[in-house]
Image: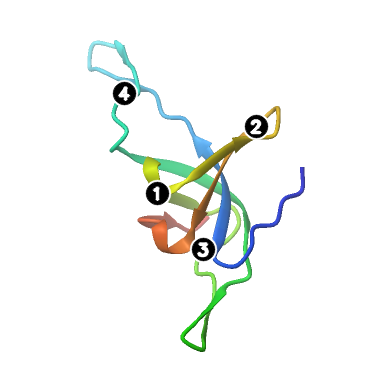
Amino acid sequence: MKLQPLFDRILAMPIETVKKTASGITLSEGDESEVKKAKVVAIGTGIYDCGVFIDMKIGVNDTIFYEEHTVAKFCDGENNYILIKQTDVLAYEKE
């Protein structure tokens, strides 16, 4: 699949995290308010706001941190993806 996000949107693949206690018990992911991570696979070109062009600060292969309620989720049959606006990203790590 070759998707290209529009404007200030980011296409990313969620990174599944497994939580374990000190004794090795695996915990379920029940907390929706928890900050999640994803690997960026494509970015839009940027957006104009009040006549000023705002370029994308986040790039392909960066890791983004986001809240679950700010994304659109979908699947291409094999992989899970999220689509999120750059302004909804909480933080990012450069590759």
- Does 6 sit above or below residue 48? above
Task: Answer with mark 3 or mark 1, whichever residue precedes in sequence.
Answer: 3
The amino acid type found where label 1 is placed reads Phe
Q: Evaluate if marks 1 and 2 touch, with contact meaning CB atoms under 8 Å apart.
A: no
Return the mark for residue 65: 1
Label 3 residue SS: loop
Q: CA distance from mark 4 to mark 1?
A: 18 Å
Task: Answer with mark 1 or mark 2, whichever residue precedes in sequence.
Answer: 1
The amino acid type found where label 4 is placed reads Gly
Q: CA distance from mark 4 to mark 3?
A: 28 Å
Q: CA distance from mark 4 to mark 2?
A: 21 Å
Pinpoint residue 94: horizontal percent, then vertical percent: 48, 58
Name of the residue lying farthest toward the right: 1
Q: Can you say which quadrant of the picture contains the N terminus?
A: top right
Q: Nearer the viewer, residue 80 or 15?
A: 80
Q: Evaluate if marks 4 and 1 touch, with contact meaning CB atoms under 8 Å apart.
A: no
Q: CA distance from mark 3 to mark 1?
A: 11 Å
Pinpoint residue 86: horizontal percent, then vertical percent: 47, 62
Query: Circle 4: is it few (<14), some (14-19), or many (20+) Cα within 10 Å?
Result: few
Nearest-to-viewer mark from 4 and 1: 4
Return the mark for residue 37: none
The amino acid type found where label 2 is placed reads Asn
Residue at the disc numbered 3? 58
Label 1 residue SS: strand
Residue at the disc numbered 2? 79
Q: Evaluate if marks 2 and 3 touch, with contact meaning CB atoms under 8 Å apart.
A: no
Residue at the disc numbered 4? 30
Nearest-to-viewer mark from 4 and 3: 4
In terms of image quadrants, where is residue 5? bottom right
